[in-house]
Image (cartoon, grey):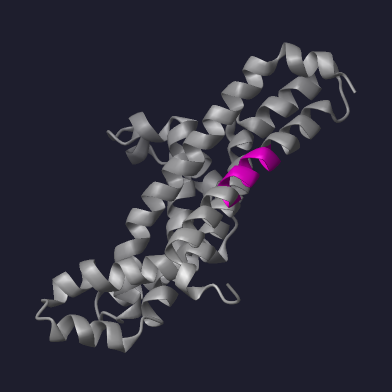
C-alpha cells in the first residue's frame, strides 16, 4: 500500500471531496425545490400537473443516472440549435451537465418521498387547521408541509446517501470528483487499488457524517414517534 503517494496527492483528493460535496448538496437542494410542489401536486392528483409529473418521475426513476448524464452531456451537443443558443454556455460545461442531471434525478425520487408523506398526513391535522380558521394556503405551509417533511426525514436521509454514491457518475464526464481523483492516482503511478481504496474510505467518512446528521434530525423532530423510550 503506497500511503506515501496518497499523502503526497492529498490536495487532489481534497479537491475531489469539494467537488463531490458541491454536486451532492446542490443537487439535493435543487431536487427538493422540484420535489416539494411536485409531490404535493401528485398527492392531490391535480388534473393538469399530475400527468406531467408522473411522466417526469417515471422517466428519471426508470432510467439509470449514467444514461441521463450521458444524454445531457453528450446528447444535447449533437444539435446545432443547442450549440447556437445561449444555453450552450452552460451545457458545454461538464459541471453544469452533471448538476442538471443529478438535480432532475434527485427531484424525481424526492417527489415520491414527499408524495407518500403528504398522503399519510392525518386528516385530523388538516381538520384542526380548518377549525382554527386557517386558509388552505396557511394550512399547507403551517401544518401539512412541516408534518410531511418530518415523516419524510428517514427516507430523505437515504436519498442523500444515494445521491452521494451516485455522484461517482461525474468522473465519467471528465470531472475529477473523489473517484476521479482515485482513478487519476492509479493511472499516473500504475497502482492497483490505492486510489480506489482511498476514495472508498472518503465516501464512507462522508456517508457516516450524513447519517449522523439525519439521525440527529430524526431524534429532534421524530422523538414522539420513537417507541420504547
| Residue 46 painted magenta | no
In what quadrant of the picture does the N terminus appear? top right
> Relative to 136, is 31 on the left or the right?
right
- x, y percentage for residue 205? 67, 39
In what quadrant of the picture does the C terminus appear? bottom right
Question: Looking at the image, which residue is at 63% across and 41% down?
Answer: 168
Query: Residue 15 falls in which quadrant of the image?
Result: top right
Question: Looking at the image, which residue is at 53% across and 30% down?
Answer: 19
In this view, the residue in front, 181 or 6, is: 6
Question: Looking at the image, which residue is at 48% across and 35% down?
Answer: 22
Is 88 drawn above or below residue 33 in the view shown? Answer: above
Is 92 drawn above or below residue 111 in the view shown? Answer: above
Question: What main secondary structure does the magenta stretch of the protein show?
Answer: helix
Is 102 drawn above or below residue 86 in the view shown? Answer: below
- x, y percentage for residue 147? 34, 71
In this view, the residue in front, 40 or 69, is: 40
Q: Which residues are drawn in magenta? A: 203-211
Amino acid at each position: 500500500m503506497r500511503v506515501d503517494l496518497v499523502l503526497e496527492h492529498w490536495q487532489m483528493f481534497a479537491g475531489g471531496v469539494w467537488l463531490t460535496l458541491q454536486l451532492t448538496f446542490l443537487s439535493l437542494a435543487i431536487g427538493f425545490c422540484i420535489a416539494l410542489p411536485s409531490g404535493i401536486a401528485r398527492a392531490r392528483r391535480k388534473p393538469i400537473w399530475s400527468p406531467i409529473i408522473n411522466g417526469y418521475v417515471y422517466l428519471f426513476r426508470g432510467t439509470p443516472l449514467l444514461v441521463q448524464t450521458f444524454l445531457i452531456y453528450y446528447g444535447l451537443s449533437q444539435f446545432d440549435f443547442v450549440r447556437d443558443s445561449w444555453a450552450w454556455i452552460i451545457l458545454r460545461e461538464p459541471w453544469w451537465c452533471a448538476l442538471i442531471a443529478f438535480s432532475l434525478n434527485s427531484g424525481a425520487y424526492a417527489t415520491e418521498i414527499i408524495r407518500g408523506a403528504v398522503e399519510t398526513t392525518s386528516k385530523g391535522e388538516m381538520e384542526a387547521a380548518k377549525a382554527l380558521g386557517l386558509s388552505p394556503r396557511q394550512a399547507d405551509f403551517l401544518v401539512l408541509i412541516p408534518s410531511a417533511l418530518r415523516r419524510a426525514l428517514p427516507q430523505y436521509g437515504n436519498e442523500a446517501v444515494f445521491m452521494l454514491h451516485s455522484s461517482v457518475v461525474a468522473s465519467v464526464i471528465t470531472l475529477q470528483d473523489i473517484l476521479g481523483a482515485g482513478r487519476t492516482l492509479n493511472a499516473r503511478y500504475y497502482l492497483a487499488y490505492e486510489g480506489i481504496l482511498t476514495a472508498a474510505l472518503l465516501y464512507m467518512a462522508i456517508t457516516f457524517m450524513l447519517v449522523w446528521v439525519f439521525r440527529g434530525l430524526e431524534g429532534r423532530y421524530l422523538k414522539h414517534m420513537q417507541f420504547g423510550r
